[in-house]
Image (cartoon, rainbow, N blue to C red):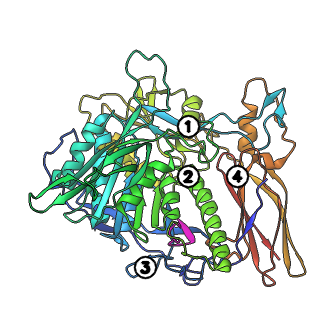
Amino acid sequence: MSTPKSTPNSTPPSAPTSASAPARKKATEVTVGRAKGRPMLSWVGKKPLGRVTAFPAQHVERFGAGDANSPLPASGADWTHWPKDLPQGGLLYHGDNKEVLAHLLANGFRGQVKLIYIDPPFDSGADYVRKVQLRGPKGTLKIDGEDYALGEQVQYTDIWSNDNYLQFMYERLLMLKELLSPDGAIYLHCDPSRSSYLRLMMDEVFGSDNFSNEIVWHYYNKMQGNIGRFASNHDTILSYRNGERLDFTTIREAREHKKTQQKRVWDSASKSLKQARDEHGNLIYYEDTERTIDDVWRLPYLMPADQTEKLEYPTQKPETVIERVIRSSSNTGDLVLDCFIGSGTTAAVAQKLGRRWIGCDINKGAIQTTAKRLQGVMQEQAAALEAATRQGELMARDDAEPTPAQLGFSTWRVNDYDLHIQHNEAVELACEHLGITRTRTDPFFDGTRGKMLAKIIPLNHPLTPIDLEALRTELKNRPEEERDLLVVSLGQEHKAREWVEHYNHNRPINKIHLIELRTDRKAGGFIKHEAMSVQASAVREGDKLIVQIDDVVSPSIIARLDLQEGIFRAQIPDWRAVVDCVLIDASHDGSVFNVSLADVPERKKDLVSGRYELAAPEAGTAVAVKVIDMLGEERVVVLSV
């Protein structure tokens, strides 16, 4: 079992306290430049952004490793142009990346990002899921002879119509260009299904003259058997610079086989290369042990058995691929951005290589996975720095990794995408409950019920007129559609009901029918979320604070287990099996959760400790304990000491 790591002073440099935290701001508009490159790709519904609304961000959590207030020696990071109301450190945003990018543009990051790497959905027509199981050694926790398993959890759905996918990518690329520095570069990771479209789109947004490379990542170790065609064992990475200037570092790697080369020298008389000879006239040879990396990267695919990187996150990429991107196209201290952060590989590699970083994702599971991963990386770096400082070896070796640009990061939320369950999972449950037949090929509607098209509004907010205007816009793009519409939501604004009444008045087709999942007489009671319960205590023992967790009950996990075939009632003998990690804020300000201790087991078979010892805070201080279960649900309990 991993040892919980305490960080006695865990506020990143310049991190705001509750008293100095930025006041809530109103939404603003930011401008986005038009694409001027050629050729130009066309699709139905193509339109530039022009202006986009930027919403304020809510600061929800911060983490620091070691003495995060101490300056990092020779890190190379220049924070001069960093926004004054943001803590100096990594930034992790939970929200739709279109809204997050607008927020960054409105808050001082225009033209400040040196390197962008994105691994967006590929329009592959697949649901990406992660396998979820309870903690503990395999075979030790069983029900009726079966190992505990929670099945698969949909992380995101990669199902689009071609036009919607292209517009989705177009809008985000336009905004990313605004964030990129004049000497910066962008790398777009894709597969053969849409690489030709994305290449033309990148030509339009960044200019064909700024094309740098089409990199082929050949993952030779992914076997597909006899599939009736050549196996698709490569991805494509499109690289573009943002202007004429570009910092690029050539990377070399060891040759698989040493190569004997003839030494050549420049003959100034003939102005050409010639073979080198020694004083006796003999040809000079040397052994070439390295090669310059070209645009074909033969790197292994992450296999299920991988024990060093694999996080059970769909579409996770190996660090070796991202490392080449970051080493070649950024310098120590530069700012790296990934707005499809996923499992956090870009942020983790950037952190290890001494870069600053910003990441975001709409999937809460991605944010939790990334946060846990970065906590581990920063804790290791802090320990290594402390040991090197004690031994006087800091930056003494030429082959030493760069000093971290930061040892803390903060987590923010733009708009409210904090679902108790994944939206895609909620859609599945709602469709089953209401008898809706899923239509996975439709990019907008979720399915059909009888002769009606069904749309399920995200359950993180009530139905609003904005949702209904989006519905009206979609119908304008389908002039031949005559079916009525079923709109399902969790709550309804009064103005939304008025909107529907006005819209339906004297309308012969496309009438809107509403179902509210909480109160509808026929369909109500569907959503009865029972929050996770945590029994915990905090007591003083001299100068120590002892935090003890006695029990955790996750009704969501119990319900998931009860639904499995062959299981009548789930009984979990050890509460720690349902817990993914435990975080403690030893001096909670009632607003931002400041991680002063993180218990994140390294392996699935390891369990959290449940008992934690920290330095005792002042009397009357509030101590907050955050428990995250294996499905990603969070519960915070606040204790007084």
The residue indicated by pointer 2 is 364
Residue 181 placement (x, y as % from top left): 29, 67
Which corner quadrant of the image does residue 269 belong to? bottom left
The residue indicated by pointer 3 is 79
Q: How crowded is mark 4: few (under 14 residues within 10 Å), some or many (20 or more)?
A: some
Residue at (54, 26) in percent of width and height: 435
Q: Which of marks 2 and 4 is nearer the N terminus?
A: 2
The residue indicated by pointer 4 is 602
Residue 303 placement (x, y as % from top left): 56, 36
The residue indicated by pointer 1 is 129
Q: Which of marks 1 and 2 is nearer the N terminus?
A: 1
Between marks 3 and 2, how big is the CA–CA gap?
29 Å
Between marks 1 and 2, how big is the CA–CA gap?
13 Å
| Circle 4 SS class | loop
The C terminus - image quarter: bottom right
Count of number-bearing discs = 4
Most foreground residue, 639 or 258: 258
Magenta stretch: give its range.
Answer: 400-412
| Circle 1 SS class | strand
